[in-house]
Image (tube, helix red, strand yellow):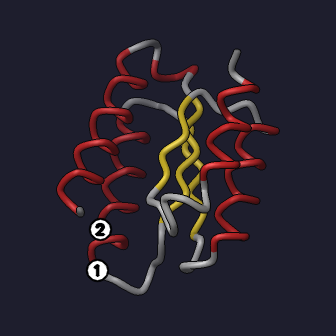
């Protein structure tokens, strides 16, 4: 699970940064900040974004599906270019993902 998530995060982040990184806005909703994996993930994402002059906004869902959905909706409102989600609940976040798909069409 963590390997697949990390791969998705890295591929998505680096793909976005490949195109004029200074213009790229990234929103990331991470599951929690109490686990060292997520602390390190957030640190690496910030460092990579800074290196490429990309903007990154990291929100922490704290294992709360409602918070994660609100974070994703906030990213849509902010018109970020990339949204990275470390899922609280893969079924529950479906509505937020559909909102993103509709907004990006």
What is the distance, in whole Å, between disc 1 and disc 2 at their CAs?
Answer: 6 Å
Q: In the rendering, at what x and y percent does residue 69 appear?
A: 70, 59
For disc 1, the neighbor class at 10 Å (few under 14, some 14 to 19, many from 20) is few
Location of residue 67 by image quarter: bottom right
Q: Which residue extends farthest right?
A: 77
Q: In this rendering, is residue 15 above or below 85?
A: above
Horizontally, is 91 left or right of 80 in the view?
left
Query: Which residue is at 37% across, 35% downward?
Result: 13
Q: For this rendering, which residue is in front, 15 or 1?
A: 1
Q: In the rendering, at what x and y percent does residue 49 appear?
A: 42, 40
Query: Which residue is at 72% across, 70% downward?
Result: 66
Q: Which mark is residue 104?
A: none
Horizontally, is 2 left or right of 20 in the view?
left
Evaluate if marks 1 and 2 touch, with contact meaning CB atoms under 8 Å apart. yes
The residue pinned by badge 1 equals 36
Q: For this rendering, which residue is in front, 78 or 101?
A: 101
Q: In this rendering, is residue 90 above or below 39?
A: above
């Amino acid at each position: 699970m963590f390997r697949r998530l990390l791969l998705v995060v890295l591929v998505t982040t680096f793909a976005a940064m490949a195109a004029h990184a200074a213009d790229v806005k990234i929103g990331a909703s991470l599951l929690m900040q109490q686990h060292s994996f997520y602390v390190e993930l957030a640190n690496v994402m910030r460092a990579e974004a800074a290196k490429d002059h990309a903007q990154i906004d990291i929100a922490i869902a704290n294992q709360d599906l409602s918070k994660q959905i609100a974070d994703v909706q906030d990213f849509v409102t902010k018109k970020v270019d990339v949204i990275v989600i470390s899922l609280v609940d893969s079924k529950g976040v479906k509505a937020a993902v559909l909102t993103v798909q509709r907004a990006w069409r």
